[in-house]
Amino acid sequence: MAGRYSEAEKGKKQVCEDSNTKIKRIKAPSLDTSALVKDNELTLLGRLTNPREQRIWALIPGLPRKWNLQGRAEGSDLGNSCFQFRFEKEDDMRRVLDNGPYQFDRWMVILQKWEPVISASFPSLIPLWIRIKGLPLHYWHDDMVRRVGEELGHLVTHELKRTVARVRVLIDGLKPLVKESIVEFDSGEESTITLEYEKLEMHCSFCYSLLHARKNCPQKYEEERTRSGEGHLNQEEDSHVRNVSQYQHTAPTRVASRPLNEKPRSGIAAPGTLSQGKSGLSPSAPNPVFHERVDRHGNTFGDRVGTKQTRNPPPPKGKSAAVVTSSKENEIASKGQEKSYETPQYSKHRDHNSGRYLQRGRDLFPRRSEGQWRPKQILEADAQAGNASSQPKSGQMEPVDPVVEQIELGNHQGLPKDAVMEQLHEVTRQYLSCPDPVEAAVRRQRVL
């Protein structure tokens, strides 16, 4: 009997692709890239060290402003936090590399000359000046300084003076920085040196990496998780023991004395007992002192804040506040006599002669109710001086006051006093209604 064919052989079953081969692999053909290599000789490749804080679309137009180029530099985004700049002149590219390192948004930027290499970690080198501190003075030698630079990365140059020893090194920006190092001498002695990086911007202060901040450090997160995982069970046991033992080692609460035959009020436990609640305490557990109590996290409450610090004291009972407004009342208060405060009598009429109603709202003729107009009394000496000054000069007409003119006209016509006063009041209003504010103020003062 012939064997049965499987579903795959019959073509009835769809063959599923392997889940591990999701990325398509493409075979590159054999090409001559010599022309393209020559075309990219004046190209710099860059990389962002912290893409969370840096924006490449803002870096491409902003970074060339710091270079003071003689020619043009065309930038573009290459993806994967990388970018490129193509220069027209070689001098501009060389000057940009010599004046490094650079930073953007307070984080370092990796900038390196393009090379025909295929690597996911390219570019990665940053040129930095590093000061060497802690080296014994009798080892301040060129060979010693060069050795330190070669151990840190690719040594570019070094500088040795009487007061400073530093090296310029191309360090790998994708790896953590080295801040300290131990130098071993031929005599078997050791010396710890400190490395200080110049023009270094923000970096992780925990692992000294340029790629993230301290709050996003994976190494710090792993250590904290490991530390918390080891003590997780111990913390639960310690918290349970602490919550129970905190009521067993505290002094009893001081309770105000009461008669023995008096029963406690409803809702309040008797002294020395505690009702069963959320805390899970036994009824016989003593109530601790306030400053020795702890919350659910094990922190003490501290000293109780008095009410004198949180609110104003109430007035004394059975006594009224004394208001002393004169020397006589001061004498009464000094003798121990108290005087109750009395509110002023309510008055319906307003005082229109106050400063608030001085210029507006008051009667122009306050003595009109008397029904008699009285001329101002002037002394004889002042009258003679006034007559002499009021006489007009030759060729000048005497100014006529409209108010005085209206009074004289009413007396001449023989009108009653009320009609004359009413006409006088109307003439005064017309006299004060002047469009010019300065002239109106002068006339108002003249009428007053």
Image (cartoon, rainbow, N blue to C red):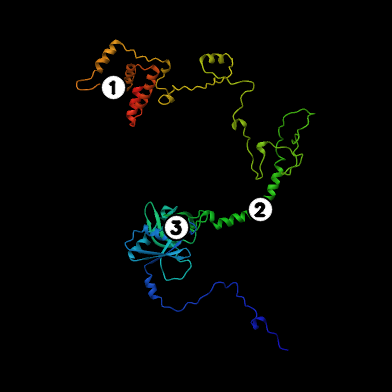
For badge 1, the amino acid type reads Val
For badge 2, the amino acid type reads His
Residue sitting at 52 percent across and 13 percent down?
328
Q: Nearer the viewer, mark 3 or mark 1?
A: 1
Between disc 2 and disc 1, whose residue precedes?
2
Q: Is residue 421 above or below residue 149?
A: above
Residue annotated with mark 1: 400
Residue sitting at 39 percent across and 72 percent down?
37
Between disc 2 and disc 3, whose residue precedes?
3
Instruction: Residue lying at the far bottom in this picture: please name it.
Output: 1
Instruction: Work out whether residue 343 or residue 230 is closer to the camera in this orientation and state it.
Output: 343
Quarter where residue 379 is shown: top left
Q: Is residue 320 above or below residue 86?
A: above
**Horizontal side, residue 45 vs residue 212: left or right:** left
Residue 165's x, y, as percent? 40, 55
For badge 3, the amino acid type reads Met
Instruction: Residue lying at the far right in this picture: please name it.
Output: 261
Q: Are dots 3 and 1 in contact, CB under 8 Å?
A: no
Instruction: Work out whether residue 448 or residue 114 is closer to the camera in this orientation and state it.
Output: 448
What is the number of the mark on residue 232?
Answer: 2
Residue annotated with mark 3: 108
Q: Secondary structure at mark 2?
A: helix
